[in-house]
Amino acid sequence: MPDSVLAGGVPSIPEFRPIQKTVFAERAQRLRDLAQGHAMQEYLLFASAVARAQAGELELFPDTPVPDRARLEHCQRNGLPPLSIDSPPHVGWQNGLQRLLDALNQEALPPRAAQIVTTLHDADAAALERDRANVLAGAYAEIDPGRAPFIGAALQVHWAKMALRLGKSGRSAGVEFGLCPVCGSPPVVSVIQTGGAKQGLRYLVCSLCASQWHVVRVKCTACASTKGVSYLFIEGGTDAVKAECCDECKTYLKILYLDKDNRMESTADDLATLALDMLVDEKGFRRVGPNLLLSPG
Amino acid sequence: MSVILTRRQFFKVCTTGLATSSVAALGFTPNAALAEVREFKLIGAKETRNTCPYCSVSCGVLMYSLGSNAKNAKQEIFHIEGDPDHPINRGTLCPKGAALLDFVRSSSRLRQPEYRPSGASDWQRISWEDAFERIARHMKNDRDRNFVATNEQGATVNRWLSCGMLAASASSNESGYLTHKFARSVGLLAFDNQARV
C-alpha cells in the first residue's frame, strides 16, 4: 500500500505510463511461451521472431529526431499528440525496416513469408511510404496483409525510439478521448494493472508506441459511454482476457486482468486470443484498435 | 480549421477474414485456429459501479456479476471490491465494505416490506402500498399529537420533535434535495443523511 494511504491521504491516479525499454524483449519471450501447444503456434513463433528483431533494433537506438521543446510545448498547450501519426515520420524508419528484415532468419519462415521479405527488401521508398500511410490509417483493405506486419513492426520500433527519448514529456493532456496522448493512435488492448498506486486501475496500451494512459474502468474506450458495457469471454477458457463490449456504439476492446495472470503482455496476449475476437465479431461488435502484428484481412 | 482529426477506424476480425489475413498471406495455416473457434462459446460478465451503503464516507465499489449474455438475463454477483478509480477510497474498503458480498447474499436479507403487529412474534409480508399507508398513518398520528407550533414566548417554531429521519448514503444531489425539502416541510428537526459528506 502506498505511504500516502497509510498517512491518511488518497493517492492520485498516475495518468500516464511511458514506454519501457524492455517492451519488445518481453513481448518476444511471452509470444514464445504462449506458442506452446497453441492453435496458432506457428504464427505466434513468427510474431515472437519479429518482436525479437524489434528488440534488437531498439537496442541500436540511432539518432531518431524528436520534436524540440517549443514544438512539445505547443502540442501540450493545444492537446495535440507530440509524436502524431499525422506527421510523416523521419525516413529513418525505412532503414529500420531493412535492418528488421535482415535480423529475421529467412530459412525459418514459410516460403511465402520469405518471398514477402525479399519483396520488401527491394521495394522502393514511395511504395513503402504508401504502406506506412495505410497501416497508420488502419486502411487494411489497401495494404497487402503479408506486408502489413513487417511495416507495422518497423513503425512500432521507430515510434518506440522517439517515445523512449521523450519519456514522460512525450505526453500531451487533452488529446481526443481513447487515443494515445503521445502519438494519437488507437489502443491495442486495455490492461488492469497491479501493484502500488496503479493497483486495479485500467490503462490503454498504444498499438503503435506502447505508451499507456489511464481511462476509468467500465467505460467504453471508443464512445466514453458508461451504459451498456459488458464483458464477454470464452466459457471454460481464461477469464484473464475479456472483450469489453459497448452496446451504445457496438465496439469492443480486449481487457487483460494482470491480477488474474501477471505474465500477460499486451500485444502478445492479444494475438494469442484471436479466437475471442472472432466470437465477439459474430455478436456484431467491431474492434476499437488494431494489433500491428496482424492484418485481419 | 479543426486541427484534431477524428480517427475512428474500427476493425473487423472475423473467421471469414482469417483466410485473407496476415496468417494466410504469410503462408501459415489458420485451420487449427478456425476449428477451435467453432468449439468455443461466449459467456457474459458485468462490472457495475455502486456506492457502499454502510456509512457516510460513501466509498465506491465495483460489483462483478456473471450471467448469460442474453438481454435482461439475471446476473449473479460473485465478487465486490473497492473501485480503484473512486476519488474517496481509491480501491480500498473497510472490513464492513469488504464483506458486502455476504450482505448481498445474506439469507436474512430483507427483500420485501414486512410487518409485525404489536404483541405478535411473527413477521408477515405486506404490499408496498400497505407499507406506505401504515407508515404515513403512524407519522400523521404522531405529528398530530406532538407537533409544536409555537414556543413559550409565543413565537412560531413549527417543530415535530417526536419523529426523526435517516436517509441513505448513495443519494444523488437531487434525491438529497427532495429528502431535505420533505423533512423540513413537515417540521422534522432530527434528520440526518448518510450522504452528507
Image (cartoon, coloured by chain):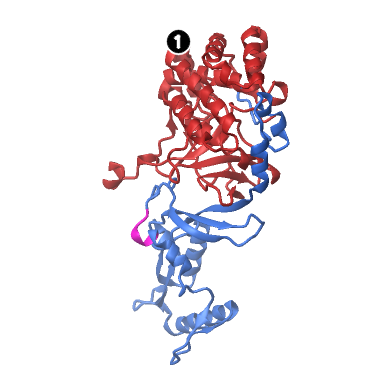
Q: Which residues are magenta?
A: B93-97
Chain for disc number 1: A
Q: Amino acid at mark 1?
A: Pro
The residue labelled by disc 1 is A62
Which residue is at the front of the view, A263 or B12? A263
Question: Color of chain B here?
Answer: blue
Q: Is residue B137 above or below residue A20?
A: below
The residue furthest bottom is: B119
- Let me know if residue B96 is in the magenta part: yes
A203 relative to A272 in the view: left or right:
left
Residue A59 percent coordinates (x, y): 42, 16
Which residue is at the front of the view, B147 or A276? A276
Q: Residue at x 47, y 73 (%)?
A: B107
Q: Main secondary structure of the magenta part?
A: helix
- Figure chain in red: A
- Let me know if residue B188 is in the magenta part: no
